[in-house]
Each structure stands twice: as C-alpha cells, then as structure tokens.
Image: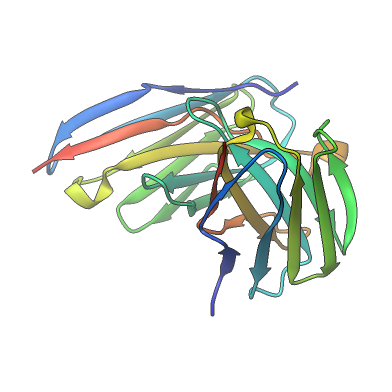
Amino acid sequence: ETGVTQTPRHLVMGMTNKKSLKCEQHLGHNAMYWYKQSAKKPLELMFVYSLEERVENNSVPSRFSPECPNSSHLFLHLHTLQPEDSALYLCASSQIGTGELFFGEGSRLTVL
Amino acid sequence: KQEVTQIPAALSVPEGENLVLNCSFTDSAIYNLQWFRQDPGKGLTSLLLIQSSQREQTSGRLNASLDKSSGRSTLYIAASQPGDSATYLCAPRGSGAGSYQLTFGKGTKLSVIP
C-alpha cells in the first residue's frame, strides 16, 4: 500500500447507526486531516491532528468524533447523523514544515 | 478569514490548446499554495506546491506562478490533452497560527475536447 488509504469507499447508514471511517497513511507524515466535501461547496476542514494531538476543530458537531491512535492512522466515528451530513469525506496527511498535502480517495457517505 | 476565488468556474477547450486557470486569495500572509486536480468522485491529486518565497514551479506541462503581494496564482497547462479533463483546485495555506488551514476555492472544471 502506498500513499493515503481510506476505507470504506462507500457507506450508507441510517440516522441511528454508528459507523467509523478509517484512514491510513504510508508516507511517514506527522499530521493528518479530515475534510468534508459537499456538492457545490468548497472543501471544509473538519479536524487536524499534529503528532497525534488534535490541533484544530472547526466547529464540527459532536456527532463526528475523530480519533488518532498513532501517526499513521486516523478514524472518524459517526453517530446519529443527519441527511445533510451526506458528503465525500476526505483524509489527508502532510509533514509538518513542508506542508504539502496528500489526499486519500475519500469515503462517500450517504445518510438515509 | 481567507477567501479563495477561482475563475473561470468551467472551461472547455479543444485538444492541444494552451490554457490558464486563475486563483485569487484575500489574505496574502500565506505559507505556501498548492494546486490539485480532482477527477469525479475521487480524491485530490497534488500537482504543484509553491512556497511563499517562490515565484513559480514547473512539472512537465504544468507551470504555476505565485504573486503573493497581489493575492494571485495561475496554473498554466501547455498542449492540453483529454486526460487533463478534471476539476482544478487551488489552496493557499495560512501562516503562523493558521498554518494548519488550507482554504480551498470551488475549483475550475476543465473539459478538453478531442
């Protein structure tokens, strides 16, 4: 595996379900990010982890809960979502200092 | 708050043509600026990264320029090919306390007609 890998690629869930999105980076980076991409809107930064500590949380509802157990893995735990949360969720990583961002293929989430 | 505008929103050109995509941003205090392409339903692929101290970067048929003081960047694509069809996004990264924040534009959707 190379680059940034996200699973699952597609997820359909009901409003009462609990699910998780997983991201793994194989680039030796020390910062990881979650972005949300909704139709016809720019990418929105949700969370940033630097050296496994959360450094940014852009007013994201508590129904989204991130977890970064180590520098290579990032999770986004989902519970009691709303239909408007349906979007493409993108994970990215970078090396602190150089700043070039590398993205995964995304997880397409549909909330019924 | 940084705002990014990309013009045009969509562009259709015949194969072989040279073209320029424009990106403007409101806050010139940036650390760097990155250009990406995104194919439908896919993630973003990094094309070029320009540091704030640089004026331009080149990779193959792509050339990106940066004028930080005027808040502008351009992406030049030479001899366009159908495989270049995608949405192109620019994203300046803030400096200092905002250095974790990349602000994205809505992108330019490029179609290269064979």
Question: What residue sits 54% from the left and 29% below the top?
Answer: B105
Q: Residue furthest left?
A: B114
How far from the left and from the top, in percent, is residue B20? 33, 32
The colour scheme applied to this rendered structure is: rainbow
Question: What residue sits 74% from the left and 72% below the top?
Answer: A72
Q: Considering only vertical position in the picture, is A31 above or below B65?
A: below
Q: Residue furthest bottom?
A: A1
Viewer-proximal residue among A27 and A13? A13
Viewer-proximal residue among B32 and A75? A75
How far from the left and from the top, in percent, is residue B83? 23, 52
B98 displayed left or right of A88:
right
In which quarter of the view is residue A23 placed? bottom right
B90 displayed left or right of B37:
right
Viewer-proximal residue among A15 and A38? A15
B63 displayed left or right of B78:
right
Image quadrant holding the C terminus of chain A, namely: top right
A9 displayed left or right of B85:
right
On the question of residue B81 being in view, the answer is no
How far from the left and from the top, in percent, is residue B22? 42, 27
How far from the left and from the top, in percent, is residue B102? 68, 39
Q: Considering only vertical position in the picture, is A45 above or below B68?
A: below
Question: What residue sits 51% from the left and 58% below the top?
Answer: A9
Viewer-proximal residue among B47 and A89? A89
Image quadrant holding the N terminus of chain A, namely: bottom right
Question: What residue sits 33% from the left and 42% below the top?
Answer: B86
On the question of residue A44 being in view, the answer is yes
In which quarter of the view is residue B69 placed? top right
